[in-house]
Amino acid sequence: MPMNLEVPKKFLPLVGQAHQVAEEIFRPVSRKYDQEEHAYPRELDMLAALLDGMNDGSDMGGGAGAGGVRRQEQSDEIRNGSNMSTALGIVELCWGDVGLLLSMPRQGLGNSAIASVANDEQLKRFDGKWAAMAITEPEAGSDSAAIRTTAEYDERTGEYILNGEKIYVTSGERADLVVVWATLDRSLGRAAIKSFVVERSNPGMKLDRLEHKLGIRASDTAAFILDDCRVPRENLLGSPEVDVKRGFAGVMQTFDNTRPLVAAMAVGLTRACLEQTQELLAEAGVEVDYDKPAQSQSAAAAEYLAMEADFEAARLLTMQATWMADNSKPNSLHASYAKAKAGRTCVDVALRCVRLCGSRGFGEELLLEKWARDGKILDIFEGTQQIQLLIIARQLLGKSSAELR
Ligand SMILES: Cc1cc2nc3c(=O)[nH]c(=O)nc-3n(C[C@H](O)[C@H](O)[C@H](O)COP(=O)(O)OP(=O)(O)OC[C@H]3O[C@@H](n4cnc5c(N)ncnc54)[C@H](O)[C@@H]3O)c2cc1C
C-alpha cells in the first residue's frame, strides 16, 4: 500500500494552529516554568478549553493533544486519522515546549490509554477528564510485568481493592484520574495485569511526593501510595478475565498508540534544536548548502546536514507508526522503531547543537540548553532506548520475552 510522505492537506490547519500555540503561548513562558518547578502553568487552562473546542469540531477525533488515539474498525479505505493528527499536533507543540505539552489538561497518557482500550460506556463516563498513567513502581520500571500492586475483588461491594506504590506519574498531581496498572493474581504472571481508572480524589490514593527533575520541570511527576484504594468494578479497562494465552496484550496495546506520540514529542524538540542552530550558524557565517555534498562544506555545515538526515528518518518512522495505527495494522514493531530512533536522535541532536553553538548554546539566554535537558526523558519514558531495541530484536528474531531479555 503506497504511503504519501506529505502532511495530509486536511491536517494543515491543525498543524498551523498548534504551531501558533507553541510560538505564542508555550515559548514565552517556557523559561519561567523551567525555573518555577511544580508551579501550575495557568496559561494552559484557557488553551485546554480552546483545544476541546478544536477536538469537538474535527472529524478526526484527535486534535493536538494525546487524548484521541482510538482505533477504528478495519476498512479497505486508506485513512489518515486521529493517531496521525495527534502526532502532528504534538510535534508542533513540542517544538514549543515538551514540559508544557505534558501539562496540558485532558491530554495525558492516561487519556490515550482510555481512548485505546475503554469500552463505549467508559469512554463516555471519562470524557472531559484529565487522566495520568501509573505503571512504574520502585521495583518495576522497564520490566512492567514485574509490578507488585495488587487488585483484589470484593464481591460484597463489587469493588476492586488496590494496594501498592506507584512512582513517576506524569501529571499525577494535577490530573482528575489516574490509570493504575495492578495484578489480579501475581502467580498468573503478566496475563493478570489489568488497568484501573482511579479518581484522584479517592482517599485510598495518597500523594507521597513530587519529584525534582533534570528537565521537563513544567510537568509534575508524582509518587503515590495505594492503601486499600477501592475502585468500582466498572473502572477496570478491558476484560476482567485472565486469559493466559493472550497474556499481556490488553494493557500493552496502549503502547502501540502512545510510543509514536512520544516519538512525535522527540521529533518536535529535535526540530526546535535544529532551527535554532541553523540560525546561529547563519549568524556566524555558516550557510548550509543543500545542493552540495556534505564533505565539500564546512565541518559545521556537514554536521548539521547529518543531524537533519537523522531528524527526517525519525520523523518518517513516527508518521509511519501513526499511519499504521490509523489503518488498523499491527504496529508494535514500528512504534518501537519510531520511539527508538526519535528518542535517540533527540538526545543526540540536542547535545550536538549545544556544542555547535558554543557558549551561546550552553547559556540561559537561549532555550537550547533547556531543550538538551528536556530531551533526555523522551528516550526514557514509555520504554527506554534499550527496551525499544530489545522489543525490535525479539520481533525480528521471532523470540519471546522469556527467550530474549
Ligand atoms: C520524568 C519522568 C516521567 C515519567 N512518567 C511516567 C508515567 O507517567 N507513568 C509511568 O508509569 N512511568 C513514568 N515514568 C517512568 C519511566 O517509564 C521509567 O523510568 C522507565 O520505564 C525506566 O524504568 P526505571 O526508571 O525503573 O529504570 P530501569 O528499568 O531500572 O532501567 C535502568 C537502566 O537499565 C536499562 N535496562 C533495563 N532493562 C534492560 C534490559 N532488559 N536490557 C538492556 N537494558 C535494560 C534501562 O534501559 C535503563 O537504562 C517516568 C519517568 C520519568 C523520569
Image: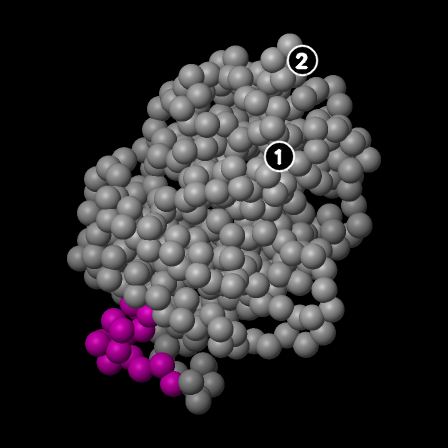
Q: Amino acid at mark 1?
A: Leu
Q: Of helix, strand and loop, which one carries label 2?
A: loop
Which quadrant of the rendered structure holds the C terminus? top right
The span shown in magenta is 275-289
Judging by the rendered image, the residue that carries numbered circle 2 is: 155
Identify which residue is drawn at 30% across, 61% down. Answer: 21
- Secondary structure at badge 1 equals strand
> Which residue is situated farthest in the bottom direction here?
291
Q: Quadrant of the N terminus?
A: bottom right
Q: Which residue is mark 1?
A: 237
Residue at 50%, 27% in the rendered image: 198
Whether residue 167 sits left or right of residue 339 in the image: it is left
Can I make out residue 184 in this image? yes
Three-letter code, disc 2:
Glu
Residue 30, placed above or below residue 323: above
Q: What residue sits 67% from the left and 21% below the top?
A: 184
Residue visible at 75% across and 55% down? 396
Q: Nearer the viewer, residue 325 or 319?
A: 325
- Give the prevailing secondary structure in the magenta stretch: helix
